[in-house]
Image (cartoon, grey):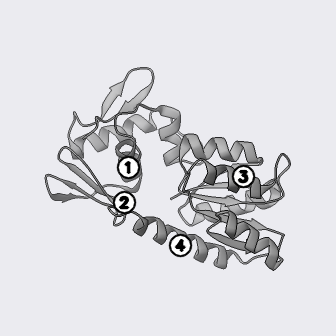
Amino acid sequence: MQILLVEDDLSLAIGLQQALKKEGLIVNHVTKGEEAIYTVKTLSPDILILDLGLPDMDGLDVIKALRKQNLSIPILVLTARSSVADKVSGLDLGADDYLAKPFELSELLARIRVLERRISTSSVSNIITIGTVSLDTGSMLVKINDQETLLAKTEYMLLKALMQNAGRVQTRDSLESTLHSWGDEISSNALEVHIHHLRKKIGADFIKTIRGVGYTVNKA
């Protein structure tokens, strides 16, 4: 699960990143609304945690911009604005949940789990099938020739990113951001190692290497 945290209070953002990463979540952080809109469009995180009091634009305008562009990412507003009117405004504009500061980490985690469950059941079909490979984003099951195949978490996330973007080349940077939070120390060949292990399990020809750019899989 990849989360984009939009928060200009750096001490709070660092603390949240550390706490959420301990729960096995991948958390990237930006401080401005324009950065948030760009990151959602280009990297497609799973959940957006959004403060409203941002330095360049109001968080409500971020929600409006994302929904105007038909970007359906679940949005959890995390803000000091706690009035009923503020909550109604955020939810009416397209936020999925609203949590006022100060908050308990346990409640935030519970709300993230709710959004995660909603993601897994929101589509008519959660199954992506390309050739002999089938991936169910709801149950996180992968089948090769109708036989269930066990993948490590990083392998599953990598395969999901490639299959959801079938026919489009995914750069090294975009794939690494799927597997790691920004700023994490990553060995220079970590991505290649994951690709190697994945190819051994699903077939050597399924993932194509685009030299100097990244990787892709063909459309079904």
Q: Does label 4 or label 1 sit earlier along the sequence?
A: 4
Return the disc, 1 or 2, that comes first in the chain's sequence.
2
Which residue does the numbered mark 2 point to in the structure image? 137
The residue labelled by disc 1 is 160
State the residue at coordinates (24%, 53%): 134
Q: How far apart are marks 2 and 3 (CA)?
A: 27 Å
Label 3, secondary structure: give it.
helix
According to the image, label 4 marks what residue?
113
Q: Write down the residue under mark 3.
A: 62
Name the spot of residue 53 as percent of width and height, x first. 84, 58
Disc 3 from disc 4: Cα separation: 23 Å
Q: Badge 1: few (under 14), some or many (20 or more) residues near its Cα, within 10 Å?
A: some
State how many labels appear: 4
Q: Tell me which residue sits at (47%, 31%) in the image.
A: 171
As helix, strand or loop, the secondary structure at mark 4 comes to helix
- Residue 188 visible, this angle: no
| 72 horizontally vs 53: left or right | left
Disc 1 element: helix
Q: Do the residues labelled 2 and 4 touch (CB within 8 Å)?
A: no
Q: How far apart are marks 3 and 1 (CA)?
A: 27 Å
Mark number for residue 55? Answer: none
* Image quadrant where residue 17 sits: bottom right
Label 1 – label 2 distance at C-alpha:
8 Å
Crowding at label 4, few (<14), some or many (≥20) Cα neighbours within 10 Å? few
Q: What residue type is labelled 4?
A: Arg
* Position above or below: 78 against 17: below
